Amino acid sequence: MVGIFSPSLSTDWLVPGRNLFLTIHVLGVACFIYIVAQRLVPLLRAESDPRFDHPLTRLRNVLKFWLGQWKHPRYKFAGTLHILIFTGFILLATRAFTVLIVGVSPNFVMPGLSGRTGPIYDIITDYAATVVFLCMVVAIVRRLVFKPARYAVPAKYGKSHTADAVFLLGLIAVLMLADSLFAASNAAGHALQGESVEALAVLSLPWMLKMAIDSMPLAMLWGINVGAYLLHAIAFYFLLCYRPFGIQFHVETSLFSVYFAKLERGTLKPVRWGVPDERLDQVKSFGVKKFEDFTWKHMLDFYSCADCGRCADNCPANAAGRPLAPRFLTIKTRDYAFKHYPVLGRPKEGEPLIGSIYSEDEIWSCTTCGACEEECPLLVEYIDKIVDLRRGMIDDGNVPQSLQKPLKALESRGNPYGKMEKKKADWAKAAEFQQTCSVKILERTNGSDKGADALYFVDSITSYDDRMQSIARSTSRILTHIGENFGILGAAEKDSGHEVRRFGEEMLFMALRDHNTEAIKESGVERIVTADPHAYNALKHDYKDVPPVEHISQVIAREVKAGNIQFDAVQNKSNVYTYHDPCYLGRHNQVYDDPRNVLDAIPGLKRVEMKRSRDRSFCCGGGGLMLFYEPKEEQRMGVLRVRMAAEAGANVIVTACPFCMVNIEDAIKVAGLEGKMSAIDLTELVDQCIARESIPEKQETVMVGG
Ligand code: SF4
Ligand code: SF4
């Protein structure tokens, strides 16, 4: 690409090539810097977000998720296409800059590419340009002819994005074509002048173009060479400066989004970073009400979304026809940011988001299941943003009617049903149950004479719901069977507050958390067990200074492995079981194998997997106080889930969460599958199948107080 045959030595429109191209470069770079600086304006006005810790973990994330494109193969065809394009871009970056500089400095060689490495790099990049060009053609055909459903834009979210996507894909194809034509005309020109030329990669785009122009006279080749250079430079800078106006901005921002991505699953951002709980009452406004209330990282997310639609494709709220699709939450906010922080003109601050770009129902529709975040290849976050928007609505007194009663009950009674505290342990007092097991109610120990080693944290739904009390009894019998010295808090236990917090009621959550933390500490226990993944997630991530917590499935799996739990054969061998991963056990806490290992240890139990399982599990619809609030939807999430189980050939759905149980049992009825399909909690199944003769020495459990 060097020598006398160089665009820098041309004269175009009476202007020396070197001057013309230098002007294009300076203008292009200046425009890009100006546009990006304007895009940074809202981020500088945003709420703080401390994402500068753990640099090594963050770098590992960049290597895995950005450079390694880790999540892309989850969608095989589109993922492969993206990996090819991304790899091509990375390889071609040096070549693109070399080509640009050659326009002003004809003998420029990129450091490290002189000598033998230069020709090798040229061969590799000839192929890279070819592959990227072909990928663009395939992507355009896919967009225009095959039209994958996840790219569709329903009318309520605006107009189709296809034209913009095709335009950008076409522009990249033109860039590859110009790059290849420049290389081809260079090689052909040098050869015609009898100079030694580097070989072009056989069957690559530059090689084919060279074959096509080889016989042309030198003047024509020279014209093609300068024209290809000009086209390349214009396409390059146009793309560079156009990208910050739409989805292609992710090319620049995604690396930073991935680097600054949230590191801990299952956690929620505090109301305000840097403001401790005890000073929260001094915060004037909670949550996100206007765009500027988002943190800078959340704004960066809006810029980084590639509009691939994977989040919405996996969102159960979207599948059920609720007015929420995470992809459009981002796109709408990005459009808002572009409109209110224009590249030319003054920013317009302060417009409320609810009622302008978001509807209330849209924000209440989320079950905080995490499927969107699990799927997003760029690690865009949703739950924290949605909870922040809810905090803003709650702060304005904007609480859905159906939730006002349970919230009041949580405040006054510590549970959403408004039941008496003294009835909390009634499930443990049933005469039939007491013949099989007795449960301690832990009294205050004041740090001495602890009543038990482990606390079974039952939580509201399992304590008060007649059907779910069976989970509490099975859990207690299992703990007794393995010889655990455990007890419950009884009336002293309030709701864990997990759903309350995700609903946006931070102050109420804090009151519940502080009460429970004190009661747990006073009980003197060393560990906590729960059969409720929501309580598990709260105790593990939302509470501080409490003993370590395990979900009962983890305890059972360990005891099965150690030989302390053995099973009789499953009662009905013709049953086909499938395991439904609860979101707060699976996706948020990565407990996928323990429940499956337990099921597989039961002799004669036939188990099949649903198409959507493990980290792609489909939410039953129970999270985020959804048991008390049902947004408008076309069909129930639980019904969709039950149908998935039927499609997998199962007739028994095993789950490990009382919220899932409520929704799935209800959905079985709604789907008309009563009698054909049933649901059971893992603890209930284990309790049924446990080989009682293998009982280790039975512990002495005494009912104290109550
Ligand atoms: S958390 Fe779940 S329900 Fe909420 S937006 Fe994401 S996928 Fe949809
Ligand atoms: S948020 Fe992530 S998954 Fe959703 S459309 Fe954007 S890039 Fe794709």
Image (tube, rainbow, N blue to C red):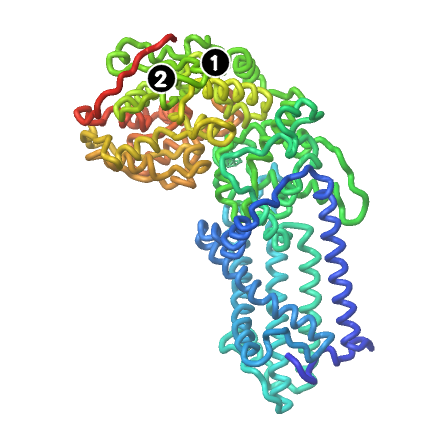
Mark 2, residue position:
469
Mark 1, residue position:
417
Q: Is residue 149 left or right of residue 563?
A: right
* Residue 414 vertical position relative to residue 393 in the rendered view, above or below: above
Query: Looking at numbered disc 2 in the image, what kind of residue is underneath it?
Result: Gln
Query: Looking at numbered disc 1 in the image, what kind of residue is underneath it?
Result: Tyr
Q: Position of residue 1 (x, y in %)?
A: 64, 79
The answer to whether marks 2 and 1 mark residues whose Cβ atoms lie closer than 8 Å is: no
Which residue is located at x 51 percent, y 60 percent? 138
Residue farthest to the bottom?
194
Residue farthest to the left?
693
Q: Position of residue 704 (x, y in %)?
A: 35, 10
* Residue 354 vertical position relative to residue 101 in the rendered view, above or below: above
Count neighbours of disc 1 (C-alpha within 10 A) and say few if under 14, some if 14 to 19, many if 20 or more.
some
Q: Secondary structure at mark 2?
A: helix
Which residue is located at x 44 percent, y 34 percent? 583
